[in-house]
Amino acid sequence: MQETGTKLGESKCPELLEAFPQAILSVDDYLGDLSVSVRAADIRPIVHFLKETPSQCYEFLMDLFGMDYEGYAREMPGRFAVVYGFYSYSRKARLRLKAFLTQHEIDSIHDIYKAANWFEREAFDMFGIHFKGHPNLKRILCHHEFKGHPLRKDFPSNNYQRLRTALPSTEL
Amino acid sequence: MAFTTRLEDFVNWGRSNSLWPLPFGTACCAIEYMSVVSSHYDVSRFGAEVVRFSPRQSDCLLVLGTVVEKMGPVLKQIYDQMLEPKWVISVGVCASSGGFYRAYHVMQGIDEIIPVDVYVRGCPPTPEGIIYGLMKLQEKIKKGGIVRARDRHKVRGK
């Protein structure tokens, strides 16, 4: 799944490749926009590596969201992916990490980056991706009576659902 | 000097000229409504300037903006809390039909859950449009009988 002509050995993240040779599926460095695809099973050690290793030092988890590749033009390593956006204040560097899921689940990183807590709830709500070890994995945007995961490609856009109750403040 | 009239006409004249609006503002239509109640457009000329933010103290519910499905039960509860007689103006296309939000999360018109008396078109409507809707409601009140809202209206599809 080589996304551009960059060979793995020539990439701009040699430390990451050296540390996780088996986990990394591809590296894309389009216009200086570094993007690394990995197996979901190894996400926790990789994220921990990116945060704690001095050569990486990605202090800031900017974003975390799900992807649904159903019907995508190219063959992908899995239907769902979780995409992490990292930024390093000290190095002024960005890194996009894509973890491809084989099941609908992946390990939570809420204890490595606290910002991941609500992001993971959003990805769970929108895509039904289960984050193992998350302390409070319940819907964050949709109503608790809502059925389905609306950003999945097979979710009909006209799936209106009449809700019975106003959301209690404890569910917010 | 003496006037003669029907009781019904007298009551309706009073009601139509002293509407107490409750703004249920969820989007840009509510910004337009701020102009309507301010001095330039001055809705007090129509006797509907005393805006109350409690359903117990108002009789004209103005739904100003997009109502998502999650907000639906809240809107219904507020409507149910209003005392009779009560009227509803649906301001703008979002409240009236969902507008350009043709997707799972937005109610395709508030008349799916509460009865609506007047629909105001526009995205957002001009202040003149909202005043026109209010005048249409006044006409409707003057023509109507002294009956309860639930006898006047039905919710769409029921």
Image (cartoon, coloured by chain):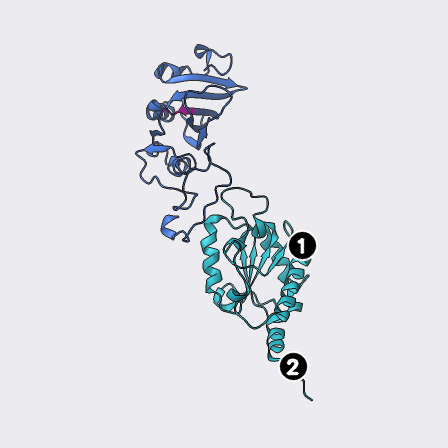
Chain colours: A blue, B cyan
Relative side of B54 to A103, left or right: right
Image coordinates for residue B102, horizontal then vertical, percent = 55, 42
Image coordinates for residue A169, horizontal then vertical, percent = 38, 52
- Residue B5: which numbered mark, if any? 2
Parent chain of label 1: B
As displayed, is residue B142 above or below residue B89?
A: below
* Distance (Cα) linking label 2 and label 1: 36 Å
Secondary structure at numbered mark 1: loop
Magenta-drawn stretch contains B41: no
The residue type indicated by label 1 comes to: Thr
Relative side of A79 to B32, left or right: left
Mark 2 or 1: in front is 2
Picture quadrant of residue B132: bottom right
Start and end of the magenta stretch?
A98-102
Q: How crowded is mark 1: few (under 14 residues within 10 Å), some or many (20 or more)?
A: some
Question: Dot 1 corresponds to which residue?
Answer: B126
Q: Looking at the image, which is closer to me, B114 or B70? A: B114
The residue type indicated by label 2 comes to: Thr
